[in-house]
Structures are given as C-alpha cells and as structure tokens.
Image (tube, helix red, strand yellow):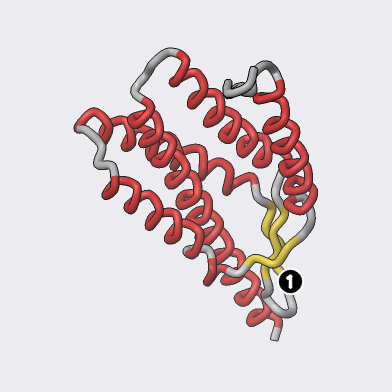
C-alpha cells in the first residue's frame, strides 16, 4: 500500500455532495418562502453578472458551431422556464408606500430544484456516456442565463404594472 494513491470511490463520492446540496437547498427554500423586499431597480444585477460569466466562459473556450446551437437551445429553454418561474413568484404592493415584496412559490422552488438536479445528472451522464462535455456545459450556461434573465424581466414588468395600478388607485382616491 505504501506509495499507492487510493482514489475515493463508492457511494460516498455522490452521497456527501448530495447531502450538502439538500441542506443548502432546504435553507434556501426556507428563506425564499418568506416575504422579502423586491427592488425593481436591482433585478438586472444577477443576469448582468451571469452574462459576464457566460461571455468569459465562451471567450475562454469558444463553442463549436454545434455548441453555439446547443447553447442557443439552452438559452431558449431557460427563457421559457425562467418566465414561468417568474410568474410563480407572488408580488405584494404596499398601497401606502408602493413598496414591493416578493414570495417565491413552492412550484418555483421545485423548478429551481429540477434545474439544479438536471445539471448534476447531465454532467455525470455526459461524462459516463462520453458525450461532448463542452457542448453540454454550453447548453447549461445558456439555460441558466435564460432562466435568470427571463424570470427577472417577467417580475420587473409585473411589478412595474402593480406599482402603477397602486399609484393610480391612490391618485383616484385623493
């Protein structure tokens, strides 16, 4: 045994990250299910940061033409999922201050869980099946970018309409 490198294996290499993920996700779900302030003017920040990350990734490792098509497909699917996830977020308007609050729905959290799970499974299955991991990564980058951006665009548009209606209702009363 001296001089040999023992590689960890077995179920532990999958179980430990899974347990860590479940604990972190449970804490995140608990936080997301509470009413939190929604700042419309800050919704662009996460998609912008992620856009920079995706762009940097594509500059460092440019996709092949097929990779670009796969990334675009991921972006499109992500936009659909993100828009739907954004619609599941409950937005409350304070009639006096017009401040917005948000509360994630269990369905929206389930979508998030499915996306993260799909990413983990796709990566593992892609490596096991000897698929093009770079193209798979490009698709997942597009999926995440589309999800983040479309969710926040939907929330921005809906939140803006709710504030406008609340202000109009207050103006009609006064």
Front-lying residue, 50 or 57: 57
Residue furthest to the left in view is: 65
Tell me the quadrant of the picture where the C terminus can be found.
bottom right
Determine whether 132 is above or below 36 in the image. Answer: above
On screen, residue 43 versus residue 16, left or right, reads: left
Foreground pick, 79 / 23: 23
Dot 1, crowdedness within 10 Å: few (<14), some or many (≥20)?
few
Kindly indicate the quadrant of the structure image that contains residue 120. top right
The answer to which image quadrant residue 162 occupies is bottom right
Residue 167: x and y, percent?
A: 62, 76
Front-most of residues 99 and 58: 58
Horizontal and vertical percent position of residue 24? 73, 44
How many numbered circles does the render carry? Answer: 1
Point out residue 163 in the picture as x, y percentages from the top left corner.
61, 70
- Viewport quadrant of the N terminus: top right
Q: Quadrant of residue 101?
A: bottom right
In the displayed orientation, state which residue is furthest to the front.
Answer: 2
**What secondary structure is marked by label 1?**
loop
139 or 39, which is in the foreground? 139
Q: Residue furthest top?
A: 129
Residue occupying image coordinates x 45% and y 20%? 127
In this figure, which residue is indicated by the disc labeled 1?
94
Q: Height in image: 90 above or below 115? A: below
- Would residue 132 appear left or right of 169 to someone viewing this image? left
Residue depicted at 39% across the width and 29% down the height: 136
State the residue at coordinates (74%, 79%): 96
Q: Position of residue 150 (x, y in %)?
A: 47, 49
Query: Taking 170 as reference, is 78 above or below it?
Result: above
**Residue at 73% of width from left, 73% of height from top?**
95
Query: With 115 as the anchor, is 139 left or right in this view?
Result: left
């Amino acid at each position: 045994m001296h001089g040999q490198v023992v590689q960890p294996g077995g179920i532990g290499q999958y179980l430990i990250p899974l347990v860590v993920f479940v604990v972190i996700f449970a804490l995140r779900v608990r936080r997301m299910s509470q009413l939190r302030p929604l700042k419309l003017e800050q919704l662009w920040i996460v998609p912008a940061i992620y856009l920079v990350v995706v762009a940097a990734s594509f500059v460092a490792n440019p996709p092949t033409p097929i990779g670009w098509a796969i990334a675009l497909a991921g972006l499109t699917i992500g936009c659909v999922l993100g828009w739907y996830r954004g619609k599941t977020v409950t937005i409350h308007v304070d009639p006096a201050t017009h401040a917005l609050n948000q509360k994630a729905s269990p369905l929206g959290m389930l979508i998030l869980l499915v996306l993260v799970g799909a990413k983990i499974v796709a990566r593992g299955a892609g490596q096991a099946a000897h698929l093009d991991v770079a193209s798979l990564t490009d698709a997942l980058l597009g999926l995440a970018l589309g999800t983040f951006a479309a969710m926040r665009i939907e929330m921005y548009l809906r939140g803006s309409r709710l504030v406008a209606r609340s202000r109009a209702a207050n103006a009609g009363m006064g």
